[in-house]
Image (cartoon, grey):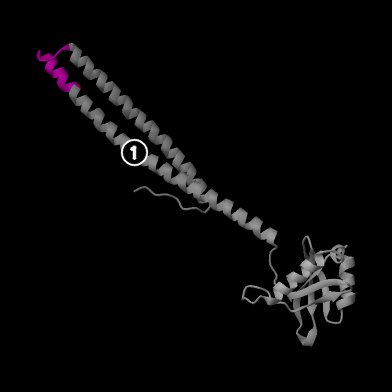
Amino acid sequence: MAQVLLARLQAALGDRYDLEREVGRGGMATVFLAHDRKDGRERDVAVKVLHPALATSLGVERFAREIRTTSALYHPHILVLIDSGVADGLPYYVTPYVEGDTLRARIEREQSMASVRSLELSVVREVRDAALRLEQNRQRIETARVGRELAEQRLDAEQKRFEVGMSTSFLVIQAQRDLAIARDNELRSYLDYQLAAVTFERVQKVGTALGSGTATLR
């Protein structure tokens, strides 16, 4: 179908354009890459032609409006209209050819980039949160260590008072229980810190692999 249309256009426009290949297709028209030889310009152009099936329907008027609109526009980022007309019964218009992605490819690329950015932000947040938990658990270790040392001192003092009859076995047992709890808290803080360190290292590696920044502890 495209080759038939290409040959048809080449026969009608061959005095000025050398049509090479199809570069795009939409619901109303097909775009061909062509070479403009008029007045020795020797430039690549895009020839947009209405689908033959629409050439005898209401699509012609819509295509004509598109041509009129394009011809009236002037902006550095808008392609200017070079030529327009009817070739073998098919309305067409010509603009400079700018090589690049199709709109679909651009959308897919931008969606992919957005997904990567979203993933990177998610990893950065994970690294930041893991670093925060690591620092919090480091502080817990210090707090638990101080608590355990104080419990040891209280037990030692209570035992000495008990030896001289200034305390009771109940108070000594209570001090021993407090020390056991303090030691358990200290052990738990070490275990939680190790778990937080493993988590931080894991998410930091993921962040490095993605090219994201890694968090540092203050």
Left or right of 109: which side holds 211?
A: left
Viewer-closest of 160 and 206: 206
Circle 1 — which element? Answer: helix
Is any part of residue 97 visible from this angle? Answer: no
Location of residue 24 by image quarter: bottom right
Q: Residue at x 68, y 76 (%)?
A: 72
Compared to 42, does 103 lie above or below?
above
Q: How many marks?
A: 1
Left or right of 99: which side holds 28?
A: right
Which amino acid lies under the numbered mark 1 shown in the image of this protein?
Answer: Arg
Compared to 75, does 60 lie above or below?
above
Residue 136 locus on image (x, y percent): 35, 39
Question: Mark 1 Cα within 10 Å, few/some/many (few <14, many 20+)?
Answer: some
Residue 88 locus on image (x, y percent): 89, 73
Q: Residue at x 83, y 74 (%)?
A: 19
Q: Give the labeled residue for mark 1.
A: 138
Does 160 appear in magenta? yes
Image quadrant in which the N terminus is located = bottom right
Residue 131 locus on image (x, y percent): 40, 44
Does 181 appear in magenta? no
The range drawn in magenta is 155-168
Residue 107 locus on image (x, y percent): 65, 57
Q: Residue at x 79, y 74 (%)?
A: 34
Q: Residue at x 62, y 73 (%)?
A: 77
What is the chief secondary structure element of the magenta stretch? helix
Viewer-closest of 179 and 125: 125
Viewer-closest of 60 and 120: 60
Compared to 60, does 175 lie above or below?
above
Viewer-closest of 210 and 85: 85
